Image (cartoon, helix red, strand yellow):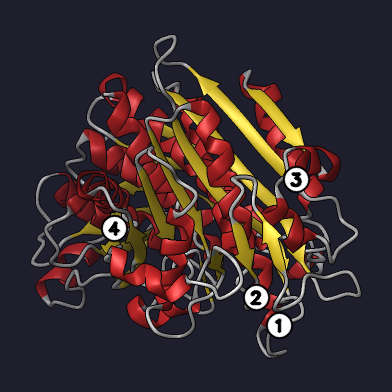
Amino acid sequence: MPLTLSLRRTALDALDVPLLVIALPPESNAVGELRALDGKIGGALGRSLERRDFRGARDETLHLSGGADGIQRVLLVGMGKGTDRASAVRRAAAVGARNARRMGVGQLAFFADPLSDVEIESAAVGLSLGAWEYTDLKTPPPQDERRAPLQSAIILVADEAAAAKSFQDGQAIAAGHALARRLGMMPGNLCTPDFLAETGRDLGKRHGLTVTILGREELEREAMGAFLCVAQGTPQDPKLVAIEYRNGPAGAKPIVLVGKGLCFDSGGISIKPAQGMEHMKFDMCGAAGVLGAMEAIALMKLPVNVVGLIGATTNMPSGTAVKPGDVVRSQLGTYIEIINTDAEGRLVLADLLSYARRYEPAAVIDAATLTGACVVALGHNASGVFGPDETLVAEVLAAGKRAGEPGWPFPVWDDYRELIKSDVADIKNSGGRPAGSISAAMFLKEFTGTYPWVHLDIAGTAYTENDLVTLPKGPTGVPVGLFVEFVRGRAT
């Protein structure tokens, strides 16, 4: 059940809610509106701050009881010492919403005075992120063991009218994250290439977008041999989905967002180890990020032209699967030697990047859970950012920083191309262990032509195998926020 968000201008001591979440920085005191609230709850807030029972550290929480009516509970959430207050507000809102969901309070109000426009948007996104959960495939517990789901959240503001636009943008971004995370969390037998294509169709119907879908026969006519070789081991129909959002000036070149959509990646003939293979349902998070971004961009009605492009299939071992040593021909005409069938995402992206040329793009950004090497290099805190255009790379990095989805740049020097030279074909799909994420980017660069391009390796950031305090195990929604911020930056 999606969280219903609203704005309200009201005094804290006049609230009537099951839970009030208050985001506080370090060294806070019960002054201003907090003083009046403190009187309503018997001075517990002031005493807790004076005794330093609560110090405002990042993610620190303190639960205080309220009265039988009015504010029934107060949850203090620390914002930490960081200077990026918007990110701190978003994080505190997510922590508050997750705690509220566990409590079963049904409704909360969120206060972090004062909230700027950017922080109002951040609060809406954070509350939605924290409230999100995937329960589609879980049997509900017995009635007497159930807690009330978190259904609504109120963001307390000084001026509802002035906050309306930022609030609406926050809701739109939250909807994009929710779509991407739901797709990522779905098991591979449900989130199939057909399902991703149907999701694209649904976006088109709801927002009036042009949607083009190519199946196996159409991909064969397009001569997409790199994409098709990944799909030749599965009976499921591969899908290329193109979603066109045209709200910018007529004839203006679009931004093209490209996503890898491996609905399940077994590794193919170069099969992965059994342990942890269930996480390979997340190999479509690049495509989920594109779909989520298109949802948000359409809801925000940004004045810009954008094309979302995803390639969806599964990578399975079978008697018809592509083999190490095979050579395939891409749509561009490049011959590719298959060294490792588990380096399949770059083969799908190769033909997508070639296909993107027909849109004469202003810029192309692709996102893929592409290499374990990127996880080794950066861990789970930043996405790898690759591209030959330093200005565009800087623009992407800035968008990621604004979105709270940071990236780190890697070199894409011509010297690295030596790693993908083949003895029997034009190039090979794996350069081995050294500079593994860079050689993958160099492979993609072969298919970009002259348009400005950046590659995001989100293997370490698209999902998490551990609880992150603000988010549970599973998909994070990356790179929805970065995509939206990049597009919004180009729209202003």
Q: Which residue is mark 4?
A: 41
Give above or below for 240 relative to 237.
above
Q: Residue 291: x, y in percent?
A: 58, 42
Q: Residue 289: x, y in percent?
A: 53, 49
Q: Spatial distance from mark 3 to mark 2, Cα to Cα? A: 19 Å
The extreme top residue here reads 250
Residue count near mark 4 (Cα–Cα under 10 Å), binned few <14, some 14–19, many ≥20: many
Q: Which residue is mark 3?
A: 239
Q: Which amino acid, mark 2?
A: Asp
Q: Which amino acid, mark 3?
A: Lys
Q: Residue 296: x, y in percent?
A: 49, 34
Q: Spatial distance from mark 4 to mark 2, Cα to Cα? A: 59 Å
- Closer to the camera, 314 or 442? 442
Q: Spatial distance from mark 3 to mark 1, Cα to Cα? A: 23 Å
Indicate the secondary structure of the residue bearing disc 3: strand
- Discs 1, 2 touching: Cβ within 8 Å: yes
> Is the C terminus in the top left, top right, bottom left or bottom right quadrant?
top left
Q: Spatial distance from mark 3 to mark 4, Cα to Cα? A: 58 Å
- Discs 3, 4 touching: Cβ within 8 Å: no
Q: Spatial distance from mark 1 to mark 2, Cα to Cα? A: 6 Å
Q: Nearer the viewer, mark 4 or mark 2?
A: 2
